[in-house]
Image (spheres, rainbow, N blue to C red):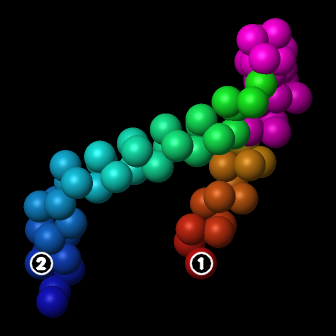
Amino acid sequence: MGDGDILDEVWSQEDDIRASTRDWVNRFLFLAYGPLSASEMEAYLGYSETPAGLSLNAALFAGFDEAYRD
């Protein structure tokens, strides 16, 4: 298959890929944040908006990028 054929194949699966990704993210978020109390979640959200929280999130996503790249 050429590059164009591969892209066409991926785009033809866009709806399924989006649904699968959405389902995975929802499950991940439920497992990751479900055990938190409302006050713990509010504290985490507040932290995530600080410079340190933004830096942490950027570092985590950079790590995920590397993991998926491999």
Front residue of 61 and 35: 35
As displayed, is residue 52 above or below residue 69?
above
- The quadrant in which residue 46 appears is top right
- Residue 44's image quarter? top right
| 43 horizontally vs 13: left or right | right
Residue under pointer 1: 70
Q: Quadrant of the C terminus?
A: bottom right
Is residue 50 visible in the rendered image? The answer is no
Q: Does residue 41 belong to the magenta stretch?
A: yes
- Does residue 16 appear left or right of residue 46 in this picture? left
In the displayed structure, 64 sits above or below 54; it is below
Report the predominant secondary structure element of the magenta stretch. helix
The x, y position of residue 40, in whole percent, is 83, 17
Tell me residue 49's x, y (percent).
Answer: 75, 18
Disc marking residue 5 = 2
Check disc 2 and give the amino acid type.
Answer: Asp
Q: Give the residue at x 30% y 48%.
A: 18
Dot 1: element: loop
Q: Which residues are magenta?
A: 37-57
**Quadrant location, the N terminus:** bottom left
* Residue 63, horizontal then vertical, whole percent: 72, 59
Is the residue marked by circle 1 packed among few (<14), some (14-19), or many (20+) residues within 10 Å? few
How much space separates mark 2 and mark 1, taking CA atoms? 23 Å
Instruction: State the SS at label 2.
Output: helix
Residue 34 at least partly seen = yes
N-terminal-most mark, 2 or 1: 2
Q: Nearer the viewer, residue 58 or 40?
A: 40
Q: As rendered, which of 65 and 38 lies closer to the eye?
A: 38
Q: Residues within 10 Å of mark 2 (few under 14, many from 20)?
A: few
- Residue shown at 60%/37% (left/top)? 29
Residue displayed at 21% across by 66% down: 10
Q: Amino acid at mark 1?
A: Asp
